[in-house]
Image (cartoon, rainbow, N blue to C red):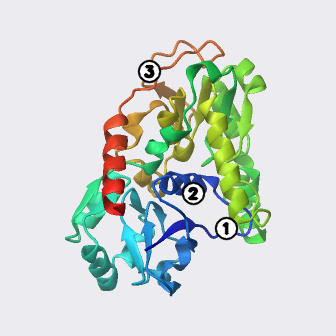
């Protein structure tokens, strides 16, 4: 049996290194990686039988679902986005998932969506919760604070001015005039000292510059960085979830107001120390003790609710690969 690892199609401007972090979570369970399989082209694969852990977000190319019969899927931490679900849950799609049930789902929304179609499904959480293999000794932890893509769903230049069509649309609907909203809202709960001294990290870098191996190197470098951090503040679940596994104090900043985003979080948000923000007003609440704003002296302790999920995932994946 050969073993495959998921890779991903870039869009014209960016790629999401969080996808590669999810693949690294899968890779640690494999005896070896014989081939890369692109998530959007799984239906096109023809070759020797290959076992593939099917974790992560599915899918952009709804017309290329279902995967090839030459792929032996391991369904854990599977997310079916609400935008893709109607097409993926065609008669053919339902039959495929029933053939490989039970389906381990990254979020409760996906599990409920599949169950509604008569598919045996259950909540597993995300495979990145098992990335404690990258954890370092406490004495290696430094004083660095990383702010990773905070409030990235807010208006930002690279998305507003993505192309001519988007530019015109965002000017006409007024979104282009809200570029200052993110910084304004961040200043409500993060001190100026932290905003000026922390390192800002972008997990959605420019596309068409790196090959797959280099993307995985970037993902690993980020994990090593987060493992030694004093504190991470982020709106990326594939930064926050690995931080839980790494034992790194993390605060998840939740300013999402679209179901396309929020459906991914069902069953996951409860794992985090969290700042919840009203994206219209900037008003916020914290589910952990916070006096004033997040400062260099802010001490947070992770909730440690993820361990049962992580241990169950490890056991499930290992049993499926044996």
Q: Does the rendering let one see residue 235?
A: yes
N-term mark: 2 or 3: 2
CB within 8 Å, label 1 to label 2: no
N-term mark: 1 or 2: 1
Q: Nearer the viewer, mark 2 or mark 3?
A: 2
Under circle 1, the secondary element is loop
Judging by the rendered image, the residue that carries numbered circle 1 is 10
Residue occupying image coordinates x 77% and y 67% = 208
Q: Quadrant of the C terminus?
A: bottom left
Question: Which percent across, then down, holds residue 119?
Answer: 23, 69
- For the residues marked 1 and 2, what is the alpha-carbon distance in whole angstroms? 11 Å
11, 46: nearer the viewer = 46
Residue occupying image coordinates x 28% and y 72% = 100
Q: Is residue 43 left or right of residue 307?
A: right
Q: Does the rendering let one see residue 174?
A: no
Residue 186 quadrant: top right
Disc number placed over residue 159 in the picture, else none? none
Under circle 2, the secondary element is helix
Residue 310 quadrant: top left
CB within 8 Å, label 3 to label 1: no
240, 175: nearer the viewer = 240
Question: Which percent across, then down, holds residue 171?
Answer: 74, 59
Q: Quadrant of the N terminus?
A: bottom left
Q: Is residue 9 left or right of residue 320?
A: right
Question: Which percent across, then down, holds residue 142?
Answer: 67, 21
Judging by the rendered image, the residue that carries numbered circle 2 is 19
- For the residues marked 2 and 3, what is the alpha-carbon distance in whole angstroms? 29 Å
- For the residues marked 3 and 1, what is the alpha-carbon distance in whole angstroms? 37 Å
Vertical relation: 136 (above or below) 223? above
Judging by the rendered image, the residue that carries numbered circle 3 is 288
């Amino acid at each position: 049996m050969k073993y495959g690892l998921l890779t991903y199609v870039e869009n014209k401007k960016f790629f999401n290194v969080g996808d590669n972090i999810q693949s690294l979570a899968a890779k640690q369970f494999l005896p070896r990686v014989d081939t890369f399989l692109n998530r959007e082209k799984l239906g096109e694969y023809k070759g020797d039988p290959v076992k593939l852990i099917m974790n992560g977000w599915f899918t952009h190319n709804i017309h290329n679902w279902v995967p090839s019969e030459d792929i032996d899927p391991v369904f854990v931490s599977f997310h079916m986005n609400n935008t893709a679900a109607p097409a993926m849950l065609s008669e053919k799609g339902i039959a495929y998932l029933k053939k490989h049930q039970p389906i381990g789902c990254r979020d409760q929304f996906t599990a409920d969506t599949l169950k509604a179609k008569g598919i045996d499904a259950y909540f597993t959480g995300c495979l990145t919760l098992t990335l404690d293999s990258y954890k370092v000794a406490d004495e290696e932890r430094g004083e660095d604070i990383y702010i990773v893509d905070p409030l990235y769903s807010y208006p930002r230049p690279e998305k507003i001015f993505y192309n001519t069509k988007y530019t015109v649309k965002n000017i006409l609907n007024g979104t282009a005039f809200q570029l200052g909203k993110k910084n304004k809202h961040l200043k409500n709960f993060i001190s100026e000292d932290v905003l000026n001294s922390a390192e800002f990290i972008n997990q959605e870098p420019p596309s068409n510059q790196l090959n797959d191996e280099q993307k995985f190197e970037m993902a690993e470098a980020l994990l090593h960085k987060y493992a030694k951090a004093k504190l991470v503040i982020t709106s990326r679940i594939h930064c926050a979830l690995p931080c839980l596994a790494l034992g790194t104090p993390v605060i998840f900043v939740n300013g999402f107001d679209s179901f396309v985003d929020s459906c991914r979080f069902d069953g996951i948000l409860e794992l985090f120390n969290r700042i919840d923000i009203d994206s219209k007003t900037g008003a916020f609440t914290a589910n952990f003790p916070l006096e004033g704003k997040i400062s260099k002296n802010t001490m947070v302790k992770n909730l440690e609710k993820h361990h049962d999920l992580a241990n169950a995932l490890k056991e499930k994946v290992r049993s499926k690969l044996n």
